[in-house]
Amino acid sequence: MNRNSSAKQPKADAVKGVFLRLWERICSAAHAASEAYRSHRKAPVVLLLLCAAAVFVLMLILNIKTPLIADDFTYSFVYNEDRSLQNLGDVFASQYNHYFLWGGRAVVHALGQIFLLLGKSVFNVVNSLGFVLLSLLIYLHINCFQKTRVSLFVGINLLLWIFAPAFGESTLWVIGSANYLWGMLLVLAFLLPFRLYAVRQNVMQNHMVFHVIWMFLAGVLAGWTNENTGAGLLAILVLMMAYFWINKLRIPKWSVSGLLGALVGYAAMILAPGNYVRATYFENKDSLLTTLINRAVRHTKSMYEYFFVLLLIFAVCLLLVYCQKRSDRARAIGSSLIYFTGFLASVYSMILSPAGFPMRAWFGPLVFLILALGPLAVHLEQTSSLVRPVSALLLCVFLPLFAVSFRGAYRDINRTYEEWQDRIAVIEQEKANGNREVRLSPIAAKSKYNAMYGLTDVKDNPKYWVNRDIARYYGLDAVYKK
């Protein structure tokens, strides 16, 4: 027995030695490549722009292959009126009706109707650019005033792709993208001056009156986006103001006006009469306390279902930074916890929503969670020699996996796009034959990257809202499920 053990020991040592030498070569090669890369000053910026262009092209491909879906047909008309959108005046009239009859998200729904007014071809380009801008805003919040980190930008986009529970609904669907992608874009753009000021206090020092006015207006727009991301925004703003005070930083007047604007915008959204009309469609026989507890439990389960891996990584990074005992760890931990509080607020504020917590609405919390993880990851990259080769290795693994995932997503999106083109051909043929009652085959998505994933389609009942709105969009009397 001992002879066998002693015989196996040299082999184990040899295998261990091979792996150690391989790891040393990987680290050495990564270090050499990194040094050569950093020796060219413009190389990181150029590469970052190339990556942004690549993201734009990939998103443009998916946007082009995504047809109008579900609510897109509804919001192509003035809300609660039987006339299609023709101009901006119609958009404002529509949102006035919507505010009093259905819901308070006037800013993002107005944006969605403007996109529909401009046409799908224009939206495809603008929305692809919007996704890139959102990625860059996340990057700027994490990396502000520091050296260019291309791997950080790539990592942000991979996290959005991997962890968004309903990627297509949140970023490709016209109305969904207006609500969630563009809503978060408004929130992060408004928050950026606060984040930059926390790092350098020379931000927006001149033309103070102008900054006070435009930050108030920007705060109104940012607060008037979504119920959960608005709650996360307010939590972050309050904590950032507290951060300024604790660190004895002068609280600028524009930050106060911005906070007031966000409160006004959020209140205008929450107090919309249409919210109370909509709430009557959702029956609830439990007591208020039981209802809130049940929703909190459901949202907690969903949070761990969607983000368990990301939360685990966040916890590990937070522990590693805390254990470093460095004087500069407080800034990274403070920034991280501020965004993490915004994440929790955006999740648990939804216990007040009678309409539930659809998968597409988790896009905002995901962005806040990535923002919470970012400062910790950057701090570890600056202070640990192991982080850079490990991150390079992870990118080498996940980029090919992303390529495979993107190929599968494109196939599903293209399949439903072609089926929609067949639908349109059937509609046009039936109309040419004088038939204004048309039967359409149902279309089902298989991938979360498809904008139709989780959305309702035509039903047997021609009075069902999807059937009704497709019918009036194409000038039909009725649409039936085939």
Image (cartoon, grey):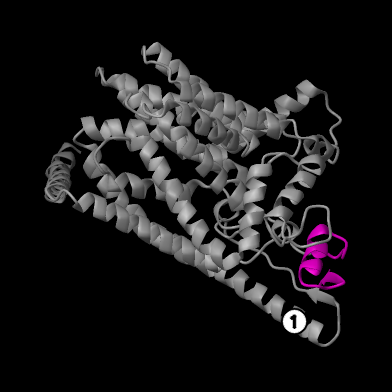
Residue displayed at 27% across by 31% down: 380
Residue displayed at 37% across by 39% down: 140
Would residue 467 be counted in the magenta stretch?
yes
Q: Who is closer to the viewer here, 253 or 80?
A: 253
Q: Is residue 319 above or below residue 38?
A: above
Residue displayed at 71% across by 25% down: 293
In the image, is 401 to the left or to the right of 383? right
Residue displayed at 43% across by 28% down: 194
Q: Position of residue 28 (x, y in %)?
A: 12, 46
Label 1 amino acid? Glu
Q: Position of residue 165 (x, y in %)?
A: 56, 47
Mark 1, other Cα within 10 Å: few <14 / some 14–19 / many ≥20: some
Specify the segment rendered in magenta.
459-482
In the image, is 335 to the left or to the right of 181? left
Q: How many marks?
A: 1
Tell me if I can see residue 63 in this picture: yes
In the image, is 222 to the left or to the right of 288? left
Q: Is residue 253 above or below residue 427?
A: above
Which quarter of the image is occupied by the N terminus?
Answer: top left
Residue bearing mark 1: 428
- Badge 1 marks a residue whose secondary structure is helix
Which quarter of the image is occupied by the C terminus?
Answer: bottom right
Residue 292, quarter of the rendered image: top right
Q: Position of residue 294 (x, y in %)?
A: 72, 29
Tell me if I can see residue 300 in this picture: no
In the image, is 139 to the left or to the right of 64? left
